[in-house]
Amino acid sequence: MKKQSEKMEIVTVTNTQDMVSRPETMALLSDIRSLIEAARMRVSTTANVEMVLLYWHIGDCILKDILRMERADYGKQIVQTLSGKLIVEYGRGYSRTNLFHMIQFAEVFRNLKIVQTLTGQLGWSHFVQIIALDDPLKRDFYAEMCRIERWSTRTLHAKIQGMLYERTALSKKSEKLIKQDITTLREEDLMTPDLVFRDPYFLDFLGLSDSFSEHDLECAILRELERFLLELGTDFTFAARQKRIIIDNEDYYLDLLFYHRGMRRLVAIELKLGKFQAQDKGQMELYLRWLDRYEKRMGEESPLGLILCAEKTAEHVELLQLENTGIRVAEYLTELPPRILLEGKLHEAIRIAREQIAVHDVKRLEE
């Protein structure tokens, strides 16, 4: 009887193993796993949203109490007292530092509807990094870009440290226009070229030696394509290398071709080792007109061009009025200078650009 029972167990195990290995069983198991993982993700997302909203309401509650008392020293005292009580009851998440973060969160993000929208992609760790920024426009920029491009907290930190905002064309516009672009991004999820393109581009990760050719630069970009796309922006997808263009039986070759999903445009990139030259504009215009005629699909916007060069000649760019032709010129850096020098250079570029805008506005009014 015992041997018969053992045989039945062996047969049962064998049958179970056979059933598990069947394709239809594996497919069913895969479907169930997907359901479980999706449910776990929804639970995690819901918990994150509720926690962030809770922290906003706590910060708002304390902030209103502090403002009502109109005493700065009261704020420090009440936070210390509240923290001591809340830690005992609810854990370390209510430390003095975190309570001050909640207050600052409610103070700089006064619109709860905006917070509710952002919580779909941003966790508390994202907000802690963003509220530390002192410029309201910069905070809004990073919050919305983080939402649109689904940055991890690590990526957000890298973007802030890499001064992404200061490198965008957006930062060089007037405050009014910056607000308009960010509002459009928030309300319509619409990416503009001024949000997408930056100057300079950091290509230090390519590991290029002191002397290299355009071919070396192109090959290094393709070798490190994932990191290059991260520097360009997450909505870029690679389309072609050395794209062949035939015009009047002559062959031309575009260095790199990308597609930007948010802008719904092809983006042509030309790599230049030296300074930007006036003839570079003509070459890129030719490529863009060809792409517009032969490669643009229904529903897409006209292609844009990006000329990446070792040195940007500012007066050439201004006189050629490149932005009116859909062409951007930007420098690339294969070695990053000390941060303080880079900050100074970027802030000076922003100052000059805004002064030029102010001069143009005055001239228009005089006319």
Image (cartoon, helix red, strand yellow):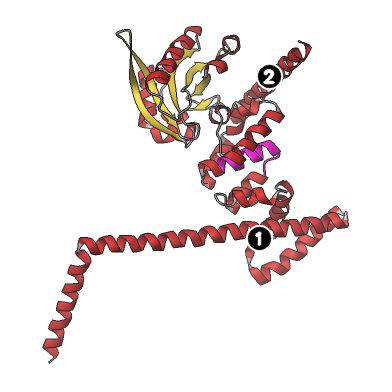
Q: Nearer the viewer, residue 155 or 57?
A: 57
Q: Is residue 4 above or below residue 42?
A: below
Give the magenta range. 132-146
Residue 243, image x, y percentages: 34, 21
Q: Quadrant of residue 12?
A: bottom left
Q: Quadrant of residue 345?
A: top right
Residue found 71% across the figure and 15% down from its top: 360
- Asked if residue 203 lies left or right of residue 295, the reply is right
Q: Amino acid at mark 2?
A: Ile
Q: Residues within 10 Å of mark 1 (few under 14, many from 20)?
A: few
Is 35 inside the magenta-drawn segment?
A: no
Residue 235, image x, y percentages: 47, 36
Q: Quadrant of residue 158?
A: top right
Q: Nearer the viewer, residue 23 or 255?
A: 23
Q: Amino acid at mark 1?
A: Leu
Prevalent SS, magenta region: helix
Residue found 65% across the figure and 40% down from its top: 140
Residue where numbered disc 2 is placed: 352
Numbered circle sitting on residue 88: none
Disc 2 is placed on an element classified as helix
Mark 1 in CB contact with mark 2 (< 8 angstroms): no
Q: Nearer the viewer, residue 10 or 202?
A: 10
- Asked if residue 58 lies left or right of residue 334, the reply is right
Marks 1/2: CA–CA distance? 43 Å
Residue 356, image x, y percentages: 69, 16
Residue where numbered disc 1 is placed: 54
Is 136 inside the magenta-drawn segment?
A: yes
